[in-house]
Image (cartoon, grey):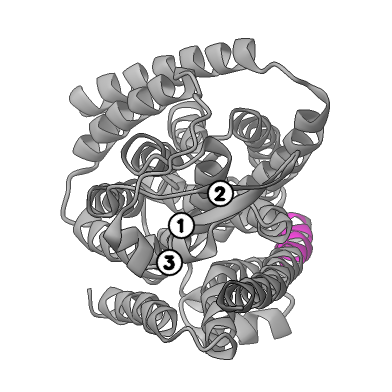
């Protein structure tokens, strides 16, 4: 009796984990495809406008000012600037694994797995702290 | 050289890197850095930025497939991500204060370590030892095998965790996924079956790289002109590699070529770093 109970419990848990695997797979695939498409379109604009210029990457001098901020990137996209579109695509790409953790957290909430809700939130917290510390430095 | 030519060279080179990285299972990130710095004379900061972005792309793309198949151990990945993200954050912050020639030498050493790992014999072992910590953290799991699910247990959780902090640190410092170090931690220390360790490492690499990429993005390491061809090339190469892998059974000679190529690149990076050319 007791054995049967644990068996059904186990089955239910496997089923739920499988749901989560499908969800995370979906998030990762969609995120990658969307961001790479944006990078590709931006690349086409960039080559079209600057293809004949001379590249200047021998010395590190940061990135152009207009793509340093979120508002700058969106203005740049409005002006059809390829580099701004590429940068948006890259930001989306960086956000994809972070979004995966957000969805894992939601998954663990649905599974009522409190320990792993905590662990996921801790990982998210470290990444957000990393963002803030990068800004300060 | 115009931007058009520069982009095309990078596209082709990154495609090759992505293909090789996927066929050997070590990722294309660390071939990109020597390729871009030594061949195209691009500053190592931009190379690190572009490599990180390509690492995230390939990790997310391939992890999507593995996680759906149920091979990836999600809980183990999530737990170890505490270590890798914390390490990566520290690495990315410290990177600014370390002279680039030191980074180049360190990079060369890690490349050689990766070459050795890629040549290691893969022993398929399934552990059944009891570990209290692994049980508490629900890390023991199973993966689909030809005759139904194969159960396995995880050992030496603490040791693996410490190794993962180191892997994250290197990843943040050098802009690579440090998949080789992750596999060492999971294969050799925690005794996880090879199939699970490689897919779980892949699953984690994206998050580790993102943790340092948010720092690098704000620092201006991630240049659109360099990253665009690299990320497209590497992803396309990795995709091709995943299709080839299904058909070919033996990749032993490929691993050997790969190990030789990265060892040569590693020695070059070390030489350039020591003579102050980078």
Q: Residues within 10 Å of mark 1 (few under 14, many from 20)?
A: many
Q: Which residues are magenta?
A: A36-47
Q: Which residue has dot 3 on it?
A: B138
At numbered mark 3, what does the secondary structure look like: helix, strand or loop? loop
Q: Nearer the viewer, residue B62 or B186?
A: B186
Left or right, residue B113 beside residue B67: left
Q: Residues within 10 Å of mark 3 (few under 14, many from 20)?
A: some
Q: Position of residue A60 (x, y in %)?
A: 36, 52
Please give the chain letter of the residue carrying mark 2: B
Left or right, residue B11 beside residue B85: right
Decide whether residue B247 is among the magenta residues: no
Left or right, residue B249 beside residue A24: right
Is A8 located above or below residue B113 in the figure? below
Q: Which mark is residue B151?
A: 2
- Whole-Å distance between the Cαs marked 2 and 1? 8 Å
Residue A84 image-quadrant placement? bottom right
For the residues labelled 3 and 1, say whether their Cβ atoms are less than 8 Å apart. Answer: yes
At numbered mark 1, what does the secondary structure look like: helix, strand or loop? loop
């Amino acid at each position: 009796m007791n054995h049967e109970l644990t068996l059904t419990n186990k089955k239910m848990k496997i089923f739920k984990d499988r749901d989560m695997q499908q969800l995370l797979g979906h998030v990762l695939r969609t995120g990658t495809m969307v961001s790479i498409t944006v990078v590709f379109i931006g690349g086409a604009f960039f080559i079209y406008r600057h293809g004949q210029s001379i590249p200047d990457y021998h010395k590190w001098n940061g990135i152009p000012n207009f793509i340093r901020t979120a508002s700058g990137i969106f203005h740049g996209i409005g002006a059809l600037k390829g580099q701004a579109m590429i940068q948006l695509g890259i930001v989306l790409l960086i956000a994809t694994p972070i979004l995966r953790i957000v969805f894992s957290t939601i998954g663990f909430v649905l599974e009522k797995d409190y320990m792993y809700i905590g662990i996921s939130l801790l990982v998210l917290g470290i990444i957000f702290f990393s963002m803030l510390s990068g800004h300060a430095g | 050289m115009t931007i058009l030519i520069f982009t095309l060279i990078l596209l082709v080179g990154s495609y090759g890197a992505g293909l090789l990285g996927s066929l050997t299972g070590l990722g294309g990130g660390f071939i990109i850095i020597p390729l871009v710095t030594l061949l195209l004379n691009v500053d190592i900061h931009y190379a690190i930025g572009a490599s990180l972005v390509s690492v995230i792309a390939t990790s997310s793309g391939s992890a999507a497939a593995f996680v759906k198949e149920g091979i990836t151990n999600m809980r183990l990945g999530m737990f170890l991500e505490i270590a890798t993200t914390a390490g990566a954050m520290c690495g990315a912050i410290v990177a600014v204060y370390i002279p680039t020639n030191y980074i180049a030498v360190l990079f060369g050493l890690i490349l050689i370590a990766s070459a050795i790992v890629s040549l290691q014999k893969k022993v398929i072992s399934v552990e059944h030892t009891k570990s209290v910590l692994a049980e508490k953290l629900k890390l023991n799991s199973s993966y689909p095998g030809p005759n139904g699910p194969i159960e396995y247990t995880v050992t030496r959780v603490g040791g693996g965790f410490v190794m993962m902090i180191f892997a994250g640190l290197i990843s943040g410092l050098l802009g690579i996924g440090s998949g080789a170090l992750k596999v060492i931690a999971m294969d050799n220390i925690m005794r996880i079956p090879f199939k699970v360790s490689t897919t779980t490492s892949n699953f984690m690499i994206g998050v580790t790289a993102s943790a340092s990429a948010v720092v690098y993005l704000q620092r201006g390491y991630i240049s659109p002109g360099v990253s665009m061809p690299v990320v497209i090339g590497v992803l396309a190469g990795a995709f091709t590699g995943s299709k080839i892998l299904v058909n070919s059974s033996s990749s032993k000679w490929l691993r050997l070529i790969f190990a030789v190529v990265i060892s040569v690149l590693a020695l070059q990076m070390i030489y350039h770093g020591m003579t102050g050319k980078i």
